[in-house]
Image: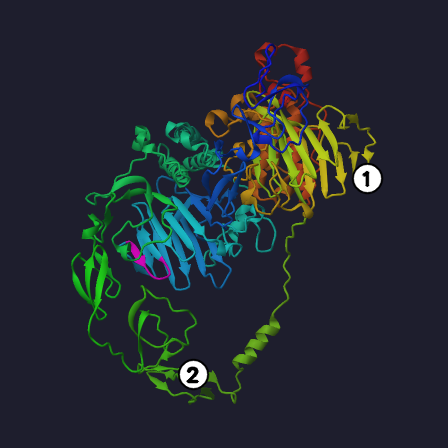
Amino acid sequence: MYLFYLLAITCPEGFEFDECTAPCPRTCGNTDEISDCDLPCVAACRCPVGKFYENGKCINKEECPCEYEGKKFDENSTVKMDCNLCVCKYGKWVCEKQECPGTCTILGRNSIKTFDNLDYTIEPVSCRYTLVQSKSTSLELKISLEFGPCSSPYLDEFNCSTGLKIETANLFAKITKKGFFVNGNYRSDNSFFSKEIIIKQASSLFYVVDGLDFRILHYAGAQTYITLKSNYRGLVEGLCGNFDSNINNELVSRTGLLVHKTKFAQEFIAFSCFAPQRDDVESEPCEVNINNEDEAKKYCSYIPFSKQFQYCFEIVPYQKYYDQCMRDMCVSEIFNPNAMCVALQAYAKACADNGAIINWRENSTLNEVCSLECPVGSGQIYTECGSLCETTCHELSQPLTDCNSESVFGCRCPNGTLLNNQKKCVKIEYCTCFDKYTQLHYDAGTSLRRKGDDCVCTRGKWICQEAKEEIICPKNQIWSMNATSCQETCATLSKPEKCVFFSNEYEGCRCEKDLVMSPNGSCIDRDACPCPYGETWMMPKSILKIGCKELLEPGVAIWFTSPQSNSPTHASLESTLNDDDDDDDDDVYVVSGETTCWASGDPHYFTFDGIHYTFEGDCEYVLTEAVDKTFAITIKNIKCGFPAVTCTKDVVVYLLNNKIHFVMDKIPTIDGVKISDRGIATSGFSIKKSDFYYSLFTNIGLTVQWDQGTRVYVHLAENWMGKVQGLCGNFDRDSTNDFMSRYESIERVPSAFAHSWRVFDCPMVPQNKPENNVHPCVYNSIRKQWAMESCGTIKKGPLFASCRNILPDNVVKEYYEDCLYDACGCNLGGDCECLCTAVANFATKCATNGVPVNWRSSELCVDQNDICVSVAQDLDCVENDESFLKTLRRPLSRYLQASGKI
C-alpha cells in the first residue's frame, strides 16, 4: 500500500513522499486508528494526513466505501438488511430503524431455531408440543406441533411431526400431510379465506397461513416457518422461545431458571398427554446408529461440496444444515436419502430468501435422488423460488399482503396461470369465482344474484351491480355488510366459550352492536333476555321453584340461586376462592448488570450479549472499544496450528493514555516498562497477579483478566450498555445484532464481521467455504480419538455433572466443540496447554453459574504450565526415540502408547 522508491522520488498523483513513515497505512478499513504500528519507519510515498488509502488512491473519509458480506459498496449504494433499507454514507451504513419480524423454524425431524436464533434439538415423545403461545389477551394465538411414530424414511422407533395446529380467538385449524381442517371441517379445495386469516396451498408442498400479525409456511413433516410481527415481541412462550432478542434466556423455565432442553420441552407438552420425564443426556444419532454414519456422510456431503451451492456460502452458512442432515440421516432407513433432501431443500430455501437462487436440480444426481413428480394433468411445473402471491383463482378476490418477502419451492402453475378449484392450471380469464354465501365455486362468465346484487364471475372476481330492489330485514334487525355466523343470541349468553365462525363475513341481516337476538328474532338488550327452561323461555325476573330451591332469572339468561336459598351465592364463592389464593413468590432468575466477553484458544469468542463463535484470523483486531474512545482492547491472533489455526496470544489495552501489553510467555508491560510480580496501582487503574491470572481493575467499570496464555476476559459494568463495539458486540442486551460490523452492517457470517474490525489492513480469511472450514480433527486425525476422550469430560462423566445439570445443553456442546477444535488444531507446540485452556474455560463458565468444580488432577491438567510438546510430525520416525517419549509427559503420550500408535 505504500510505494517505495530507491532512485527517483516521484510519487503518483495524490501521494506525497516521506523519509520516515510508518509501514502500516491508514485505510478506509481502519479510519479510527487506535493501535501503534510496531514496525520501523521507512522512506516511501504515502497519503497526505487526513486522507486514506483505498484501491491504489488517496481519498477523503467521506468517499470511503462500505463493506457488507465481504464485498465493497460505493457511496450512496443501497442494500436490504433484514427488513431495513441501508444507504452507504461516509463509509458507514445508515439504516432504517424498523423493528423487524422474527422467524422460528422447525426443520427435518426435530431441529428448532428460535425467534432469537438459538439452534437446538429435542427428542420428542408421541404428543403435542406448543411452539408459540401468546401471553397477551389482545393477541390470542397458539401454534402446536403434534408428534407420533415416524414413517419412512425415518426409523419407526423415533417420533416425527404429524400435524400442525393453529388456534386464534375465532378459529382453529389443523394441517396434516393429507390436507387441512378448519373448525373440524375438511377443506377439499385446500383453501380458507376469512377476515382474520387466510390458509391456502402455496405449492404442492407448502401451505401458507396468513394471519393479521403472523405468517406460517408449513411443509408437512419437513419444514415449518413461523414469523411474528414485532408487536408479539416479548409476549410469547413455547419451544420457539420468548422473542425478546436475548439468546441467553431462550431455555428459561417458568420458574425463571435456565434448564436443560428436555426439561424445557417438558413444560410445553399438552396436558392431555402422558409423557414420562426423559433423561437429560441425549446421545448424538450418529453415535448410536454408527452403521448409518458412512451413508449419512456420503449423502450429506452434497450440501458443502456441490458446486450449485457455492454461491450461497458467503451469504448463508451451510454448517447447521449439514449437521441437520447428519442427525436425520443417522435415524433413517439405510439407503433412503430423503432426510438429506429435506436438509438440502431447507438450505436452498434459506439461500433463496436471502437473494441467492440455487438451481440445485441442475445436478442430475441430486435431481434423481430427490425426485419430485408434479400432479399429473394439473399443468403444474416445479419452481425453486415461487412467490406466495396469487397462486389460486380463489385468492384473486382476497390476496395476501406483503407476499413477496418469502418464497417456497414445489410444483405450481406457470406464470400467467392460476390453480382453479378443480386443481388445474388455467389462464386468469378462465378462473372460477368463489361465493362466500353458498360456499361454492362458479365458472367464469356465470351470472348470480348475490344478496340483492346482480353479479358476473369475471377473471376470478365477482363484478356486481346494485339491484333495484329494497331489502327488508325481519323484526328490528338491520342490513350489515359484515354479518357472521356468530350473531350473539339469548341462547349463547350462558355459553362460556367464545363463538367460532366457520366462514368469512358476509352481507345480511343481524342485530345492531350491543344488542342480542331474542328467541322470536327481535333485537333486545342483554338484560331483557328470557331464561330457558326445557323447551320454553321464561321472562326476566321470573322465579322458578325446583324442589327446595328457588331460582331467580335476573335478566341475563342465566339462573341464579335466590338469596333466600341456603346455597352459597356466586359472589360468596368468588370471595372464598380469593381467600384461598396463596401468595406464591416464584424464584426469579435475575441477570446482574455486569456482562462478560471472552476470547479463548484457537480462537473462540463469546460476546457481551451471549453469541458464541469461532474465527480464524491472523491479524490484529478490536476486541472491544468504547464508542467515545475512553478505552480500547485489541488482540493479535498468531498461527499455532497447521494449516490455518490461530490463537489469541497478544492483548493490548489502551486506557487513560497508557498502553498495557499482555503477551504470552512475557512479563506484561505498561508503556514498555515491565510490571513486577507485586503488580501496580495508579489513580485510574491497578494490575494484580494471581496464580493463573493478571487482572486489570479500573474505576470506569472495566475489568480485564488474562490467563498468561490464550484466554482473555473483559467485564463491563452496566454503565457501558450500548456504548461499546468490536468483536465482543455492542452490549445492548440484543443478541440478534451482535455481528454489527465497523461499517454498521449486521453480518451473517463471523468471518465478514470479524474482518471489519481489523486494526490494520490485512487479507480477509474466508471461512464459509468447505475448503476453508475443515475441522482440525480431520487434518490431524491422529489426535481425534485422544481429543474426544480428553474433552469428553465436559459433556459426560461425573466430573462436571453438577454443572451440566444447570446449563442448557447447547452451551455444554459449544464448549465441548471448542475443546475438540483446540485439542486437534494446536499442533505447533503447546498441545496440552490448548486442551487445558479449553477445559478451564468451561470450568470458569460453571463457576460463574454457581457451580465451582475442582477439576485438575494428575490425569487432567495438573499444572497449567506443564505443556506437552507437539506430535504433529511423522510418528513412525520417532517410534524408537525414547527421548521423544519422555517429552510426551501428559495424557496424549499415554493415549498414543496405550493405543499402539507410538
Residue drawn at x 19%, y 44% is: 377
User: Mark 1 is on which residue type?
Assistant: Ser
Q: Is residue 827 visible?
A: no
Residue 867 percent location from the top left of the image? 69, 23
Disc nearest the viewer among 1 and 2: 1
Q: Is residue 6 above or below residue 708?
A: above
Task: Tell which of 701 and 113 is nearer to you.
Answer: 701
Q: Is residue 169 left or right of residue 570?
A: left
Task: Decide whether residue 193 is among the magenta residues.
Answer: yes
Q: CA distance from mark 1 to mark 2?
A: 78 Å
Looking at marks 1 and 2 on the same chain, the residue that comes earlier in the sequence is marked by 2
Q: Is residue 219 left or right of residue 662?
A: left
Of 335 and 369, the residue lying toward us? 369
- At which x and y percent is residue 241? 51, 50
Quadrant assignment, res 612: top right
Is 129 contained in the magenta span? no
Q: Residues within 10 Å of mark 1 (few under 14, many from 20)?
A: few
Q: How was the colour assigned to the protein in this rendering? A: rainbow
Q: Is residue 410 left or right of residue 671?
A: left
Name the residue that disc number 1 marks. 683
The residue that appears at 30% across and 52% down in the rendered structure is 179
The vertical placement of 660 against 570, above or below, is above
Tell me which amino acid carries mark 2. Answer: Asp
Residue 30 - label: none
* Residue 885 coordinates in the image, percent (x, y): 66, 15
User: In the rendered image, is residue 323 in sight?
Assistant: yes
- Mark 2 Cα within 10 Å, few/some/many (few <14, many 20+)? some
For the magenta stretch, what is the residue range?
190-197
Q: Which mark is residue 527?
A: 2
Q: Main secondary structure of the magenta part?
A: loop
